[in-house]
Image: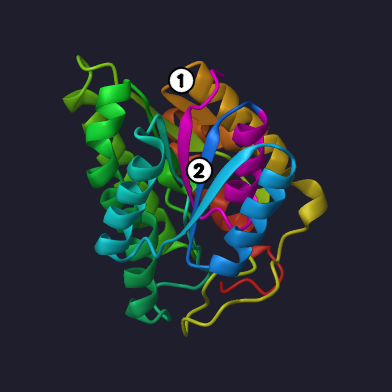
Amino acid sequence: MHDKKVVIITGASSGIGLACAWEFARKGASVVLASRNSDAIDKLSHEIRSQGLDAFACKTDVTIEEDCRKLVAATVKRYMRIDILINNAGISMRALFSQVDLGVLKKLMDVNFWGAVYCTKYALPYLLESKGTLAGISSIAGYQGLPGRTGYSASKFAMHGFLEAIRVENMDKGLHVLIAAPGFTASNIRKSALIASGAEQGVSPLTEESMMPADEVARHIHKAVMKRKRSMILTSQGKSTVLLKKLAPGMLDKLLFKHFASEPDSPF
């Protein structure tokens, strides 16, 4: 990566966002860290700078349009440009639709979909100017609706449609659009997943050891950005799900039902 590419990363306080901050900074980028958790991103910014790298923390709640506008404005004021926007901020859920409080679905759409829309709206003119990269950190749930995750799946399908439309609208302007689906990652998103009541589940039903570490995911994301890939699907489980969706969707439905029903404390 050329020195001083300017990268905005939402949801930078933990998980994939935090790992991306380190990966891009180590490759010579100036990283702008956006999160509601100002203590975490201030600490991360300090740690990155202590390594002689460049980082800037900007407290941002992506569900608030004005926060997203201010994030872009602060980035441009400091660096005069934006080369890459990584829409990574996200929350998950785990509850049957018949039992879930509808506020949970609204909250997921506000963070996962509208957060990406707001940040993209204000960053787009600068990304077009730099012929840069617009990235969305999605999920296999954006390719296939997953049981117990209606709001999560809906928000990721919405993100996919949004990013695909932007890609086509700007295909003659040099904009690169990446849709990245990391698969199950050892990160905080499942511990903070919302249950039917809207409370956080606290303990993930999945074992971290069997998952791809966040820093490995970040390396794949960096490579996909550099190679200007359209999409990135990680893990054999993720790739086989997308393939089965095309070839044998009915069989995939049955496999998913069986898989998620067998989870510890499954809502089924």
Depicted 183 relative to depicted 98: above or below: above
Can you name the residue that lies furthest to the left here? Answer: 169
Give whichever of 159, 8 is nearer the camera: 8
Q: Left or right: 33 with respect to 142?
A: right
Q: What count of labels does the image hold?
A: 2
Depicted 103 relative to depicted 170: above or below: below
SS assignment at label 1: loop
Which residue, given by chain and number where applicable, does mark 1 sit on?
229
Viewer-nearest of labels 2 and 1?
A: 1
Please tell me whether residue 41 belongs to the stretch shown in magenta. Answer: no
Question: Start and end of the magenta stretch?
Answer: 1-26
Q: Are marks 2 and 1 in contact (CB under 8 Å)?
A: no
In the picture, the quarter occupied by the C terminus is bottom right
Residue 211 percent across, percent down from the top left = 74, 46
Residue 7 percent across, percent down from the top left = 47, 36
Please tell me whether residue 7 belongs to the stretch shown in magenta. Answer: yes
Q: Callout 1: 10 Å neighbours few (<14), some, many (20+)? A: some
Give the residue drawn at x 48%, y 27%: 5
Let me know if residue 188 appears in the view.
Answer: no
Sequence order check: which comes first, mark 2 or mark 1? 2
Residue 140: mark: 2
Residue 69: mark: none
Residue 198 percent across, percent down from the top left = 47, 81
Give whichever of 181, 74 is nearer the camera: 74
Give the residue drawn at x 39%, y 56%: 112
Give whichever of 232, 225 is nearer the camera: 225
Give the residue drawn at x 70%, y 37%: 52
Residue 44 percent across, percent down from the top left = 65, 54
Depicted 30 relative to depicted 205: above or below: above
Can you name the residue that lies furthest to the right here? Answer: 209
